[in-house]
């Protein structure tokens, strides 16, 4: 069981909202209206940890270890939304999200294969870590720069915890887990070939609500994410390469094989898939 060890390790590095955020360094002259609006959108997006947790608990009923870890992940992710809202409450109170706006991103996700979902969110944590690091560089106001740096570190730690559960799955189900992780790894490391950012909050998750079944589609400004990445924080090809390299590096560690490119990982996926019996390979939802 990984939960007791992960709880202890994350508890030791957990930051305090009052003591670790440099609230007294706020400089109003360095916060633009444009920047404040992006903080608002990120606060609402982070609230979607709530429906994600409900999904994880539903789809992992047979895994009490991972489900227990969700108590830690959910707490820390909701705190990200809370600290961004606290920033707005202190310095731009007119922009604090309403309860209705927050509740709008709580909707049911369709059931999906747990291993694929685990890998999807592992890659999502890597991507969010880089998005927030880039956002910290873009912002000019000292307090929000510090906040984005702090929560980016949380995302990296969460990715590390997910990786531990992925390693555990390899020991329990072998090639079925390898095939699932490699398949989603190829998808999530191929973002440059897609028209929209590849992150769990930007993927369709409820067929009955389509096309309003992504977290981003339910924000007050559904087109915000692309504008934030491309036109504001400038998450360019150099940043995207860092994400891809980090995914490939972790896949190399997980599978004990070196992947220099997405093509290498895709070849490995095909090898593993070929080893599986037809009944062992489950289609992704």
Image (cartoon, rainbow, N blue to C red):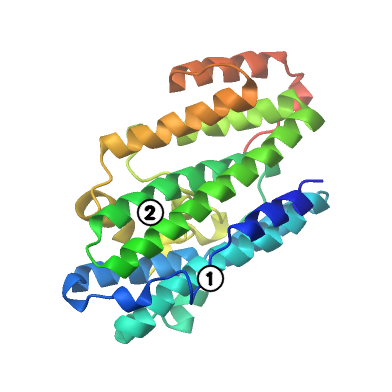
Graded by Cα atoms within 10 Å as few (under 14), some (14 to 19) or many (20 or more), the crowding at tag 1 reads few
Q: Earlier in the sequence, mark 1 or mark 2?
A: 1
Describe residue 166's horizontal placement relative to residue 279 as left or right.
Answer: left
Residue 24 image offset from top left, x and y in percent: 33, 78
Residue pictured at 75% horizontal, 55% vertical:
67
Q: Secondary structure at mark 2?
A: helix
The residue that label 1 is drawn on is 16
Q: Is residue 212 above or below residue 196?
A: below
Is the residue 15 above or below the residue 132 in the image?
Answer: below
Q: Indicate the quadrant containing the C terminus: top left, top right, bottom left or bottom right.
A: top right
Does 169 sit above or below residue 269? Answer: below
257 w.r.t. 58: above or below: above
- Distance of mark 1 from mark 2, alpha carbons? 19 Å
Left or right: 274, with 146 as reference point:
right
Q: Position of residue 21 (x, y in %)?
A: 42, 70
From this viewpoint, is residue 136 visible? yes
Q: Residue furthest left?
A: 29
| Residue at left offset 30%, top offset 61% | 224
- Asked if one can make out residue 221 in the rendered structure from this viewpoint, the answer is no
Quarter-wise, where is residue 227 in the image?
bottom left
Q: Residue at x 49, y 27 (%)?
A: 248
Question: Could you say which is closer to the camera, residue 283 or residue 29?
Answer: 29
Which residue corresponds to the image point at 71% horizontal and 56% vertical from the top-left?
Answer: 7
| Total residue callouts | 2
The residue that label 2 is drawn on is 132
Question: In terms of depth relative to the viewer, which is nearer, 269 or 111?
Answer: 269
| Residue 171 pos. (x, y %) | 78, 29
């Amino acid at each position: 069981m990984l939960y007791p060890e992960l709880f202890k390790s994350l508890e030791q590095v957990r930051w305090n909202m009052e003591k670790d955020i440099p609230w007294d360094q706020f400089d109003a002259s360095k916060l633009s209206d444009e920047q404040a609006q992006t903080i608002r959108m990120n606060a609402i997006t982070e609230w979607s940890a709530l429906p994600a947790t409900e999904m994880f608990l539903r789809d992992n009923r047979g895994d009490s270890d991972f489900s227990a870890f969700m108590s830690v992940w959910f707490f820390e992710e909701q705190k990200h939304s809370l600290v961004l809202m606290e920033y707005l409450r202190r310095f731009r109170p007119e922009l604090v999200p309403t309860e209705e706006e927050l509740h709008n991103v709580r909707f049911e996700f369709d059931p999906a294969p747990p291993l694929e979902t685990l890998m999807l969110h592992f890659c999502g944590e890597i991507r969010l870590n880089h998005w927030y690091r880039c956002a910290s560089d873009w912002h000019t106001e000292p307090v929000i720069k510090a906040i984005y740096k702090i929560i980016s570190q949380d995302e990296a730690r969460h990715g590390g915890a997910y990786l531990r559960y992925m390693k555990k799955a390899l020991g329990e189900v072998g090639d079925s887990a390898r095939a699932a992780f490699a398949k989603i790894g190829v998808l999530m490391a191929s973002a440059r070939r897609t028209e929209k950012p590849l992150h769990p909050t930007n993927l369709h998750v409820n067929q009955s609500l389509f096309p309003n079944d992504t977290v981003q589609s339910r924000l007050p400004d559904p087109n915000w994410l692309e504008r934030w990445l491309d036109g504001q924080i400038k998450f360019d090809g150099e940043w995207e390469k860092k994400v891809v390299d980090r995914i490939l590096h972790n896949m190399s560690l997980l599978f004990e094989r070196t992947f220099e490119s997405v093509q290498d990982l895709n070849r490995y996926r095909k090898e593993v898939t070929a080893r599986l019996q037809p009944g062992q390979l489950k289609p992704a939802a």
